[in-house]
Image: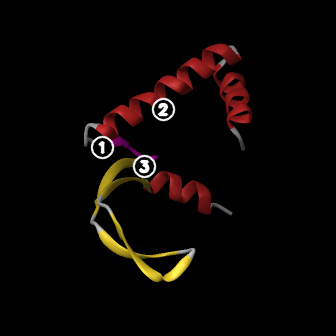
Amino acid sequence: MNKAELLSSIAEKSNLTKVESERALNAFLETIQETLAKGDKVQLVGFGTFEARDRKAREGRNPRNPEEKIQIPASKAPVFKAGKSLKEAVNKK
């Protein structure tokens, strides 16, 4: 499912127009990005948790020249951990 298909589904299920659905989805995504950038997490009970985890600096290999070692700087990585209800819904047969 791509963003256009998601927006159509949201509009259909919520009785909103596609424009209103897009505005709501964009606000949701922007809020999550801003919250993670501040170092906080977003917990949606039953659905899951979005958070940013620190990744340590490490040594890697240059893919173009595997013998060359490169330093990969420390960074933050966005992570999503699925909640119990979401896991159950996905695994439902």
> Residue beneath label 2, please?
29
Q: Which mark is residue 25?
A: none
How many neighbours does mark 3 have within 10 angstroms: few (below 14), some (14-19), or many (20 or more)? Answer: some
Q: Is residue 60 magenta?
A: no
Q: Is residue 44 magenta?
A: yes
Residue 80, image x, y percentages: 43, 53
How many neighbours does mark 1 have within 10 angstroms: few (below 14), some (14-19), or many (20 or more)? Answer: some
Of the pair 66 and 23, the residue shown nearer to us? 66
Name which of mark 2 and mark 3 comes first in the sequence.
2
Total marks placed: 3
Q: Amino acid at mark 3?
A: Gly
- Relative height, residue 26 to residue 84 (above, below): above
Whether residue 89 is visible to the viewer of this picture, yes or no, is yes
Label 3 to label 1, Cα distance in Å? Answer: 11 Å
> Residue beneath label 3, please?
48
Horizontally, residue 56 falls left or right of residue 20, namely left
Do the numbered discs 1 and 2 sit on residues whose CB atoms are within 8 Å? no
Name which of mark 1 and mark 2 comes first in the sequence.
2
What residue appears at the point 66 percent right and 14 percent down from the top-left corner?
A: 19
What residue appears at the point 52 percent right and 52 percent down from the top-left corner?
A: 86
Q: Quadrant of residue 7?
A: top right
> Residue beneath label 1, please?
41
